[in-house]
Amino acid sequence: MPITTQEIERRMTHFETVCRDKGIKRTHQRIEIFREVAQAEDHPDAEQIFQRVQKRMPTVSLDTVYRTLWLLHELGLVITLHSGRERTHFDANLEKHHHFVCEHCGFTRDFHCSDLDRIRLPDVLKNFGKVKTAQVEARGLCKACLLKK
């Protein structure tokens, strides 16, 4: 389901609040980089975000995009996903959700499932440390890749 305008506005307001509370400057570049992640459904990596933002801001550098994305991560404004392609993807959806990932092309989308939200984690995880969050990642082939085969 597409991200609504209201949800993007909510994410932008949260971004502004967190930056203000933490004393982080809301530069035009930071705003546009966060906006790109906030409105993206495809969980883009840094290079994809750079290409999209550069269309609106030709002077933005790839280094600025990388530094901003990791700042946003440190501030808790985005989460990261790691694909089998060894690239970090960024997601501004901080609500409880899960992911579908295409193992062929990397297509990634959020999905919600209350049954998965209620999964009881095994006690063995306590041996590793304290779990803060858990998400299910369903991997397979997307519709487009299935049609190609």
Image: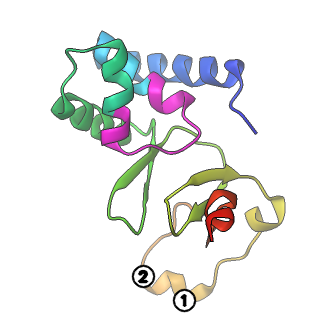
- Whether residue 76 sits left or right of residue 50 in the image: it is right
Residue 4 visible in the snapshot: yes
- Image location of residue 46, percent across then percent down: 32, 41
Residue 26 in view of the camera: no
Q: Can residue 48 be found in the magenta stretch?
A: yes
How far across and how far down the image is residue 115, in percent? 83, 66
Residue at image location 49% in from the left, 60% down from the top: 105
Give, as a three-letter code, the residue at label 1: Val
In front of the other: 7 or 48: 48
In the structure shown, which secondary structural element does the residue marked by tag 1 occupy? helix
Amino acid on which disc 2 is placed: Phe
Which secondary structure class fits the magenta region best? helix
Q: Quadrant of the N terminus?
A: top right
- Residue at x 82% of width, y 59% of height: 114
Say which residue label 2 marks.
128
Furthest residue in direction right, as rendered: 115
Quadrant of the image occupied by residue 82: bottom left
In the image, the segment drawn in magenta is 35-49
Residue 25 image position (x, y, % from top left): 28, 14
In-front residue for pair 145/5: 145
Q: CA distance from mark 2 to mark 1?
A: 8 Å
On whether residue 59 falls in the magenta region, the answer is: no
Q: Which quadrant is the C terminus positioned in?
A: bottom right
Q: Which residue is mark 1?
A: 124
Q: Using the image, determine if residue 87 lies above or below residue 3.
A: below
